[in-house]
Image (cartoon, grey):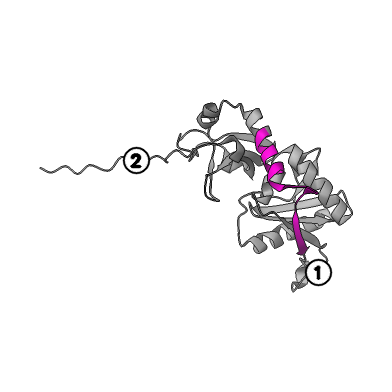
Amino acid sequence: MTLTLSPAATRPVASPLLPTNLYPAMCPHTLAKPVRLSDDGFFDSIVSVNLCQGHDMRLKCLTPGSHASVDVSHRGLATLGLSVHHAWQLAARNVLAAAATERGYRFLTRPCQPNSGRRSTRQLPPGVQVYTDTLPVTAWLAHPMTFSVLHQHLSGLLGSTQLVYCAPTAQVLCVFAHASPSQLRSLQAFTDRMAGVSTPTTATAPLAWANGFPRALQV
């Protein structure tokens, strides 16, 4: 009789975790919590911190020599000798350092016109799409220090402190000023279409800045 043995389950190969490559990522609460395990080689629970209703910070680390990243586990942090709080602080400083120039922090923006070509959104406020040429732009939303820097910059650019942030994916961030509560659902739908997703993977609701933290707005 011949026995056929199934190959053993393969765990992710450990990638070098470097403190300088850590960064915070926003994600829906359901993506950050168990049972999902890390892909940093330790196959352990992912480091996360609650940011606001329905949204968490998930710690990620860039893979050396590529633009890919892995989710960081508690065991991974232990190998670096870092607590969750210290790692989160360090990750935020990495975001700032990646965008730092002699003249301040570098943000790229372009007009975002939800009214263009759609009769149903004719009354929506214009805004800007924000992006960076380093880490995913939505990393700026995942720590009070970085979110405050971003909010101050965009408040000056848009002439209002009452901003609405829509972030359907890690790489897509649109910001609108003077949006009324009745417009939030349409703004969310517009940015989802822009990102080409039906279900957001970063922020599942429009966000506001609240003392450094994101606040999910009811739509």
Report if residue 131 lies within the magenta region. no
Tell me how far mark 1 sits from mark 2, CA to CA. Answer: 53 Å
Give the x, y percent position of residue 219. 74, 52
The residue to which callout 1 is attached is 122
Q: Nearer the viewer, mark 1 or mark 2?
A: 2
Where disc 1 sits, the SS reads loop
Three-letter residue code for mark 1: Arg
* 1 or 2: tag closer to the N-terminus: 2
The answer to whether residue 52 is seen in the rendering is: no
| Left or right of 163 on screen, residue 67 | left
Q: Is residue 40 above or below residue 105?
A: above
Report the span colored magenta.
90-111
Q: Is residue 175 above or below residue 81?
A: below
Q: Which residue is drawn at the image coordinates 68% and 49% (left, top)? A: 138
Give the x, y percent position of residue 96. 72, 42
Give the x, y percent position of residue 162. 85, 49
| Left or right of 19 on screen, residue 75 | left
Q: Residues within 10 Å of mark 1 (few under 14, many from 20)?
A: few
Q: Which residue is drawn at the image coordinates 63% and 43% (left, top)? A: 25
**Total residue callouts:** 2
Q: Nearer the viewer, residue 170 or 55?
A: 170
Q: Which mark is residue 9?
A: 2
Residue lying at the far left in this picture: please name it: 1
Three-letter residue code for mark 2: Ala
